[in-house]
Amino acid sequence: MEQFRKTFQEVQYRGSTGELSYVPYLAMCVNCFLWSLYGIYKDDIMIVSTNVFGEAFGVWYMYVFLSNCPLELQVIS
């Protein structure tokens, strides 16, 4: 998470994502979402709570990424 934080501080400072790819951030969102579903299925609050926290960060990172990427890359928004 520390590397993501440093990267996004730089993105917000520059106002552009440059050559960064959105794939790692999307993968983080999907990974945490799937682990949260698994935690719900297994009725394990520890798995759910840690991955909901990770999912919240993932959604925030994707929001920051999409709001600072060039218009031709904003396919999702």
Image: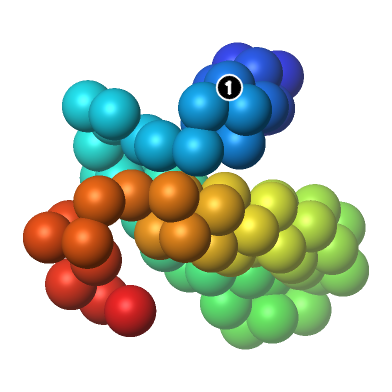
- The amino acid on which the numbered mark 1 sits, given as a three-letter code, is Glu
The residue wearing badge 1 is 10
Return the residue found at the far left: 72
Quick one: SS at disc 1?
Answer: helix
Quadrant in which residue 76 is drawn:
bottom left
Quadrant in which residue 56 is drawn:
bottom right
Tell whether 46 sits left or right of 54.
right
Q: How did the renderer colour the structure? A: rainbow
Residue 27 visible in the picture: no
Image point (25%, 37%), residue name? 21
Q: Where is residue 27 in the image (x, y as percent from the top left)?
A: 36, 50
Tell whether 4 sits left or right of 29.
right
Q: Position of residue 69 (x, y in %)?
A: 33, 49
User: Which residue is at the front of the view, 56 or 10?
Assistant: 10
Image point (48%, 67%), residue name? 34
User: Which residue is at the front of the view, 72 or 50?
Assistant: 72
Tell whether 24 sits left or right of 57.
left
Image point (44%, 50%), residue name? 68
Q: How many labels does the image show?
A: 1
- Decide: is 45 above or below 16: below
Q: Quadrant of the C terminus?
A: bottom left
Q: Position of residue 70 (x, y in %)?
A: 25, 51
Within 10 Å of the Cα at label 1, are there few (<14), some (14-19), or many (20+) other Cα atoms? few
Residue 52 visible in the picture: yes
Q: Quadrant of the N terminus?
A: top right
- Decide: is 14 above or below 29: above
Q: Position of residue 50 (x, y in %)?
A: 80, 53
